[in-house]
Image (cartoon, helix red, strand yellow):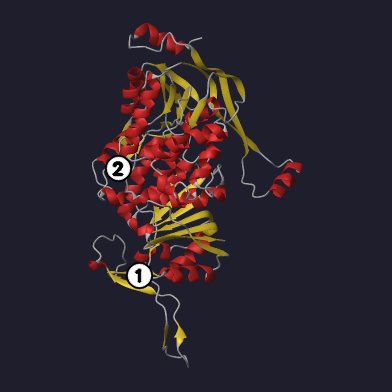
Amino acid sequence: MLTESEVTVKDANDWPRAWEGAEVVIRLENVFVEYIAPRERITSFKEYIIRLIQRRVRHEEFKALRNVNIEVRQGEFFGIIGRNGAGKSTLLKIISRVMKPTGGRVWVKGRVAPLLELGAGFHLELTGRENVYLNGTLLGYTHAEIDALFESIVEFAGLKDFIDVPLRSYSTGMAVRLGFAVATATRPDILIVDEVLAVGDEQFQEKCSARMTEYRQSGTTILFVTHDSKLALRLCDRVTWLDRGEVRLNGDPMMVIDRYHEAYQQKTQTKLNKSGSLSLSKHSRTDGTTEDAELSERSEDEALGKEWFYRFVLPSGRQTPCYLQTSLAGIHDDRLLMMTSVLQPLFGEDWKQVSALDLGCHEGFFALKLAEKGCRKVLGIDAAPEKIADAELIRRIYRLPNLSFSVADLLHIDLDQFEKFDLVLMFDLLPSLENPIGALRAARTLTKQILLVETKIAPDPHGTGEMSGHHSPVQRSGSFALVDQDEQPEDHAGGSTGFSLYPTQETLIRLMKRLGFRRVEVVHPPLDVNEQLATNKRIIVAGYV
């Protein structure tokens, strides 16, 4: 049964439909998904039981999908678009049988190969070889089938030299290559891709595109979630637009995407206040908060007109110019991967109760990633007003209600006015501060669960030496290196004195332990990462409260 929007498009348009008479292989009828969760944060099972007995647990209902009706035919390349929180990933999980709907009927025919998210089905402590067998088993392969396919999987992923290395040592690109190679080792009946390929390098994307084209020509049905309108137009036979869990439109890619863009580019009334700044009239956002859609569009244009330290992939699919060399720009993805490798085991899949503070947030890159992950609240602070202005521009573009930024100097804020945060980031901040020990002490005060410190480090000095006030030589154990900024033009850190202070690894660890962190660990860098991280010139240290 076709939906109303499909019938309308069928009568009004005449685009090529090689798949039109093919068999229906996916059918969703009146599918809805509801989540029920406690309104307030409950930190332990014991507290939950006590509140439950006292009838003090208040729940709220969230509808991720609402009466979704979709049919997909064999051999069709079917695109799904929509803004963050629209329900796209939930829809794919329902079709992949990863989760069950609250109601409605889901019918899927054939073997499904899902690529829903980076690392899904993988175990970080297992080797690449072991993960091939684990993931293959989850996808329905027998042990004998995996044996026969193993060499081709490793060859396609290009990981022959690293296949017996633990997955926690892999870079983002390596993990993606392995996941795609396993999922597509044999031609599946249905391939589901949730935009995980966007993090791969250009050569890998071309390789994946060629394999998907080959499978498509052989009759594989492909479901593809994307924010890239141009890619959807180039690849998809049909596109569905999801908005707050509902199918707004379904049909010809050009028509659906045009309507999708029009909905978020509507003119809204604005007026100038006395100071000449813009006073915005509000309307509903797709995620239920209020924001000005026209401002978001104009903000994207503004962001694309300047160069950035970070490379942001904007909601439209366009990418901001980055003034770093390509070889250097990848360090941000490596830092993100290392950060995630620590936080994922700590917070699991549900980050809705996590609060995060990004100290020295710069342009807001990592704060944005945490907000997109679903944290309850993310605050970024930086002492440089121009950096907060950039971060605010990013916030206006993505329109995430759980993200905010503020101009503040860590060493001069009133700590009593700040709440404690579950997660605190201090990325590349220590060298820019004239009192790094005071900054670490302040960060500890603000941390409820974990502090992540990322910084360049100085070589550890060793040996003994004479020190005033001591009757005998003392063993040196750690120090700070004083670096002249004029001699380090590539560095963007530095205090007002014109110098940067870099701690040794031993100094940083000892300081954090002295300041009250019960456990302090250096985050292990994956293989195939930026040279600074690979050689421990730059490290990430996790301090657990």
As measured in the structure, the alpha-carbon distance from the residue carrying label 1 to the one carrying label 2 is 40 Å
The answer to whether 391 is drawn above or below residue 157 in the figure is: below
Q: Which residue is mark 1?
A: 501
The answer to whether 39 is drawn above or below residue 491 in the figure is: above
Query: At label 1, which amino acid type do we have?
Result: Leu
Q: Quadrant of residue 208?
A: top left
Residue placed most toward the observer, 267 or 376: 376
Expressed as whole percent of the image width and height from the top left, the position of residue 350 reads: 56, 42
Front of the two marks 1 and 2: 1
The residue drawn where x is 39% and y is 64% is: 430
The answer to whether 28 is drawn above or below residue 177 in the figure is: above
Q: Is residue 272 visible?
A: no
Residue placed most toward the observer, 426 or 282: 426
Quarter of the rendering occupied by the C terminus: bottom right
The answer to whether 383 is drawn above or below residue 513 in the figure is: above
Q: Which residue is mark 2?
A: 277
Is 501 on the left or on the right of 115, as rendered? left
Secondary structure of the residue carrying tag 2 is loop
Q: How many marks?
A: 2
Is 63 on the left or on the right of 340, as rendered? right
